[in-house]
Image: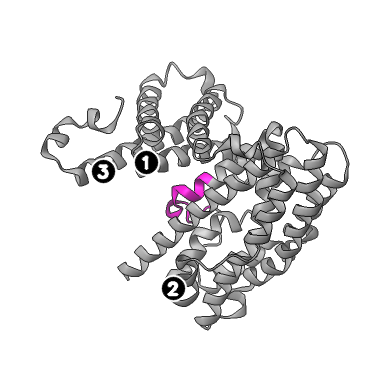
């Protein structure tokens, strides 16, 4: 069961790559459904033997996907999608969704944790292999962060950015909102995991960023409320995860990486570097979306989230660079390079996700 060709030898002989892809996707969908059922099994860790057939089939799919995505060098998109969806289904249990309490029955399941660890180990090794870590360890960290931020705060427009600004249709804009709602409707939630601990200036700056994301505790001012208003303007679903099936695996990978770095305190510097990039670079992306909405002649409600983020994230970017990243570089001189690692990873993964979103938008526009 090491790869997809072994699973479907007769299709390999016919050379029908399309059929192989379709059947592989079905196998992954079936395995994901099995995992959903395992998550809902009461007291799962004590029921593994009773569920052995389901567990075995799921684990075979998991092993196949890990080989296809991270070890065979072929970058199998179906395998990436399956793994990131499974990982997200595990990670989301760290947040409270105001739903049926029984959904959290297995949030501390050792079996579920072992599945998460297996995926993360292979995936994180694959992600890190794309960055020259040894070169980062030789940098003047403060200078590197300052130089990166000065470029990313106002980057040159890429072809994809120009497409969004100048060509994207209203149907494409709605598709952008659908994918964006995956993050926009739970604005800043994962950040809660890094706010606790000893009081100092860095912690207080992070709390300030968080409070502004949450509208200083007022639902009417919370950023997710503004995103919901954009969706409502088009009569779209305003429930969190309402468009989960549209989300490219590249976007899911960003979210799962964020879960990892917020949950593991050893990665606090990586997370802080990543958030610095996110806040510094965010306004440039939001200006593209705002320009598209204005060109399309949309209402204020249909673009209000972008205007809010441009205004607040410009301030957040300065806070993160000056009061968090540079301050942490002084406090942890031997490990400060991890700030740059986090920054660079966030940029690399964010660019990959942005390309996937534009690709998805183009596909929707071509189909309409």
**Mark sitting on residue 75:** 1
**From mark 2 to mark 3, how far is it between C-alphas?**
29 Å
Quadrant position of residue 333: top right
| Rendering coords of residue 32 (x, y %) | 40, 37
Q: Is residue 48 visible?
A: yes
Q: Earlier in the sequence, mark 2 or mark 3?
A: 3
Is 89 within the magenta?
A: no
**From mark 2 to mark 1, how far is it between C-alphas?**
28 Å
- Name the mark nearer the viewer: 2 or 1: 1
Q: Helix or strand or loop: what does disc 2 sit on?
A: loop
The residue depicted at 65 percent of the width and 36 percent of the height is 137
Q: Which residue position holds label 3?
A: 21
Q: Quadrant of the N terminus?
A: top left
| Rendering coords of residue 351 (x, y %) | 51, 54
Q: Residues within 10 Å of mark 1 (few under 14, many from 20)?
A: few
Q: Helix or strand or loop: what does disc 1 sit on?
A: loop
The boundaries of the magenta stretch are: 241-253
Q: Earlier in the sequence, mark 1 or mark 3?
A: 3
**Mark sitting on residue 183:** none
Is 251 within the magenta?
A: yes
Q: Residues within 10 Å of mark 2 (few under 14, many from 20)?
A: many
View extreme (top): residue: 49
Name the one closer to the observer, 295 or 327.
327
Q: Residues within 10 Å of mark 3 (few under 14, many from 20)?
A: some
Q: Is residue 187 visible?
A: no
**Mark sitting on residue 168:** 2
């Amino acid at each position: 069961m090491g790869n997809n060709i072994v699973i479907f030898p007769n299709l390999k002989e016919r050379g029908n790559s399309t059929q192989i892809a379709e059947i592989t996707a079905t196998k992954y969908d079936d395995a994901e459904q099995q995992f959903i059922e395992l998550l809902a099994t009461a007291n799962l860790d004590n029921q593994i033997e009773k569920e052995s057939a389901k567990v075995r089939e799921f684990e075979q799919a998991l092993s196949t996907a890990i080989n296809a995505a991270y070890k065979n060098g072929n970058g199998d998109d179906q395998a990436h999608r399956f793994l990131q969806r499974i990982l997200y289904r595990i990670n989301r249990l760290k947040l409270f969704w105001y739903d049926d309490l029984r959904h959290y029955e297995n949030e501390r399941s050792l079996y579920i944790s072992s599945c998460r660890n297996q995926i993360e180990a292979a995936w994180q090794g694959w992600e890190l292999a794309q960055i020259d870590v040894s070169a980062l360890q030789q940098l003047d960290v403060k200078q590197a962060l300052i130089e990166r931020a000065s470029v990313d705060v106002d980057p040159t427009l890429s072809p994809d950015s120009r497409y969004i600004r100048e060509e994207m249709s209203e149907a494409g804009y709605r598709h952008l909102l659908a994918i964006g709602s995956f993050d926009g409707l739970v604005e800043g939630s994962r950040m809660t995991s890094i706010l606790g601990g000893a009081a100092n200036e860095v912690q207080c700056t992070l709390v300030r960023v968080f409070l502004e994301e949450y509208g200083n505790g007022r639902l009417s001012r919370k950023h997710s409320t503004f995103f919901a208003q954009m969706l409502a303007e088009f009569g779209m679903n305003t429930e969190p995860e309402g468009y989960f099936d549209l989300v490219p695996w590249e976007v899911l990978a960003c979210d799962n990486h964020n879960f990892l770095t917020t949950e593991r305190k050893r990665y606090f510097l990586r997370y802080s570097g990543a958030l610095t990039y996110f806040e510094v670079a965010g306004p440039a992306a939001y200006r593209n979306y705002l320009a598209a909405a204005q060109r399309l002649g949309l209402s204020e409600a249909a673009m209000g989230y972008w205007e809010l983020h441009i205004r607040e994230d410009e301030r957040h970017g300065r806070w993160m660079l000056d009061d968090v990243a540079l301050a942490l570089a002084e406090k942890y001189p031997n490990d400060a390079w991890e700030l740059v690692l986090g920054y660079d990873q966030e940029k690399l993964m964010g660019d990959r996700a942005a390309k996937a979103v534009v690709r998805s938008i183009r596909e929707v526009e071509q189909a309409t």
